[in-house]
Amino acid sequence: MASPMSTAAFLAALKAEGVKVVERPGWKTHNRAGHGAWGPVNGVMMHHTGPYSTESAMVTLCWNGYSGLPGPLCHGVVDRAGTIHLIGYGRANHAGLGDDDVLNAVIDETKLPVDDDSNTDGNARFYGFEAINKGDGQAWPEAQIEAMVRVSAALCRAHGWSDESVIGHKEWQPGKPDPAGVDMTKFRARVAERLKHPASWKPTPSTPAPAKTVEQRLSDLEAAVKKLEAAK
């Protein structure tokens, strides 16, 4: 449990983690102040946006919100190239009501229970990020996932949290599917790996094995044929 960071500390944490950031003018004071609490904060929540026409239109929608749900709808939008568009800070309409047992598990940094209640205000307790994805099986670019991992690690590092403080909306509120297609257990494992290293850490890309030459493939085929003949 912690007090929310200042906007300056928040921005510095993201940049230290190597997050590419675009600051939309006015983001530092764009929030739902007066409509509920902001803090103490306990974790980071990931979402997907759902259907969209263009990425820029989705960033604007997350800023403005829509009828019945005013913006901002998150603190940052993660585009498909891996850039974080900062659109708000403070209380944002992203988490809604969720399970108090899940919140307690996040606070204790223990295994999450099944979310089967909607009785706790998550907008007060979580930093929220909307990743641009249609949620219909659309692929997730690696650059986008890496940005989501980095922003999660940045906030966990700043607050002294572990990867267990990062959850998906689908783990918070019954019936929510987002972020669809993202295995949150594997996602948290990537956050945990980042937290083992300094914020400046850059993972070494795995080097693919060199393609075999025609001669090597023929040799492998001959060896396989010999094994079959020997087995007769």
Image (cartoon, rainbow, N blue to C red):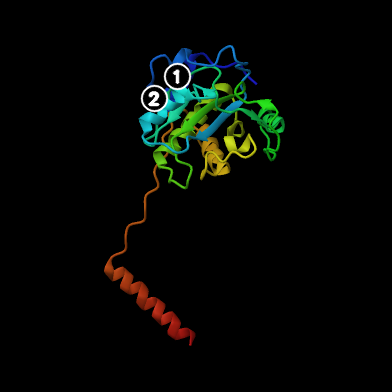
The answer to whether residue 19 is seen in the rendering is: no
Q: Give the percent coordinates (x, y) of residue 148.
A: 47, 34
Q: Which residue corresponds to the image point at 51% horizontal and 45% vertical from the top-left? A: 181
Q: Nearer the viewer, residue 165 or 158?
A: 165
Question: In this rendering, would 208 be left or right of 189?
Answer: left
Where on the picture, by quarter, is residue 51?
Answer: top left
* 10 Å crowding of disc 2: few (<14), some (14-19), many (20+): some
**Is residue 96 positioned above or below 229 on the image?**
above
Q: Give the percent coordinates (x, y) of residue 144.
A: 42, 37
Instruction: Give the mark, 1 or 2, whose residue is nearer the N terminus.
Output: 1
Q: Nearer the viewer, residue 54 or 194?
A: 54
Q: Which residue corresponds to the image point at 47% horizontal and 46% vertical from the top-left? A: 136
Q: CB atoms at circles 1 and 2 under 8 Å apart?
A: yes
Q: Give the percent coordinates (x, y) of residue 203.
A: 42, 38
Q: Nearer the viewer, residue 93 or 207?
A: 93
**Is residue 100 positioned above or below 206 on the image?**
above
Q: Give the percent coordinates (x, y) of residue 186.
A: 55, 43
The answer to whether residue 210 is seen in the rendering is: yes
**Is residue 174 positioned above or below 9 on the image?**
below
Q: What whole-number distance in Å separates the C-alpha atoms at marks 1 and 2?
A: 8 Å
Dot 1 lies on which element?
helix
Outermost residue toward the left in this view: 214
Which residue is labeled 2 in the image?
21
* 10 Å crowding of disc 1: few (<14), some (14-19), many (20+): some
| Residue 11, numbered circle | 1
**Is residue 34 positioned above or below 61 on the image?**
above
Q: Amino acid at mark 2?
A: Val
Q: Quadrant of the N terminus?
A: top right
